[in-house]
Amino acid sequence: MDADLDDKLMRAFAAGDAAAFDTLYARHQAALYRFVRRLLGSAAATQADEVFQDTWMRAIQARGNWRSQGAAFRTWLFTLAHHRAIDCLRKSGREVSAESEDGEAWEPEGDLWHGWPDAAGRAEDQAFWRAAGRRLLDCLDGLPLPQKTVFLLHHEDGLSLGELAEALNVGFETAKTRLRYAMSKLRGCMGAYVPEGARR
């Protein structure tokens, strides 16, 4: 995504150009909605529309001073959604914990990805990958919110560890540890899923 274009669009919107907002919305709505849905998980999926809409409303209300956050528009928008999702989960009585991340993340032995079918291969291979994609979403749903957040921001939005730390207001090592734990848990979860018959 072109951060400079987003900056120009947000400035134009703050100056009264409604069409600039329409362009911003078109550029980011699909990724933001996907981020919100995955962040809330299946337990709070019914609240995704509310969080999504409220995030855009907050962006509209803050249009005059959003640059004070010091982040690219897209990162700022995703951070707004993250905070709104946490509020939503807390209001619905769901626990939002940082979870203890002391010690070493579990690392499975061997290469759990070795021998998986070719994603661009035969129809059977493509069916495997569709099922694996559904399994990955289930695995992602099982992550604690802090780990899920850093994983999604890193892989969906392409934030570096430094940008993650800044956006989430945590230390660099904390962001790094959360991402490492998320990757470890996802590898283990996905590796356990792969049936022997699917390996080559």
Image (spheres, helix red, strand yellow):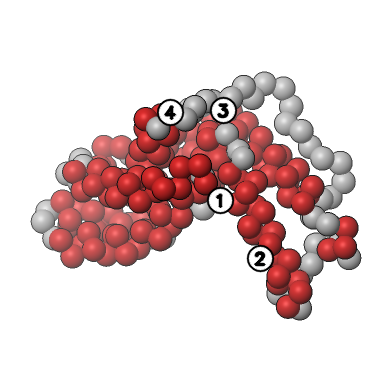
Verify CB contact (< 8 Å) between mark 4 and mark 3. Answer: no
* Lower position in the chain sequence, tag 2 or tag 1: 2
Report how far apart the C-alphas of labels 2 and 1 lie in the structure.
19 Å
The structure residue drawn at horizontal position 22% and vertical position 59%, both measured from the top left corner, is: 21
Residue 19 as seen in the image, left or right of residue 159: left
The residue pinned by badge 4 equals 93
Report how far apart the C-alphas of labels 4 and 3 lie in the structure.
26 Å
> Element under label 1?
helix
Is any atom of residue 108 visible in this view? yes
* Lower position in the chain sequence, tag 4 or tag 3: 4
* Lower position in the chain sequence, tag 2 or tag 4: 4
The residue pinned by badge 3 equals 174
Name the kind of residue labelled 3 in the image: Thr
Q: Position of residue 111 (x, y in %)?
A: 84, 50
The residue pinned by badge 1 equals 155
- Observer-side mark, 4 or 1, equals 4
Residue 157 as seen in the image, left or right of residue 12: right
Name the kind of residue labelled 2 in the image: Arg
Residue 130's disc is: 2
Name the kind of residue labelled 1 in the image: His
> Element under label 3?
helix
The structure residue drawn at horizontal position 58% and vertical position 44%, both measured from the top left corner, is: 141
Report how far apart the C-alphas of labels 2 and 3 lie in the structure.
33 Å
- Observer-side mark, 2 or 1, equals 2
Within 10 Å of the Cα at label 2, are there few (<14), some (14-19), or many (20+) other Cα atoms?
Answer: few
Within 10 Å of the Cα at label 3, are there few (<14), some (14-19), or many (20+) other Cα atoms?
Answer: some
The structure residue drawn at horizontal position 40% and vertical position 39%, both measured from the top left corner, is: 85
> Element under label 2?
helix
Q: Position of residue 110 (x, y in %)?
A: 87, 46
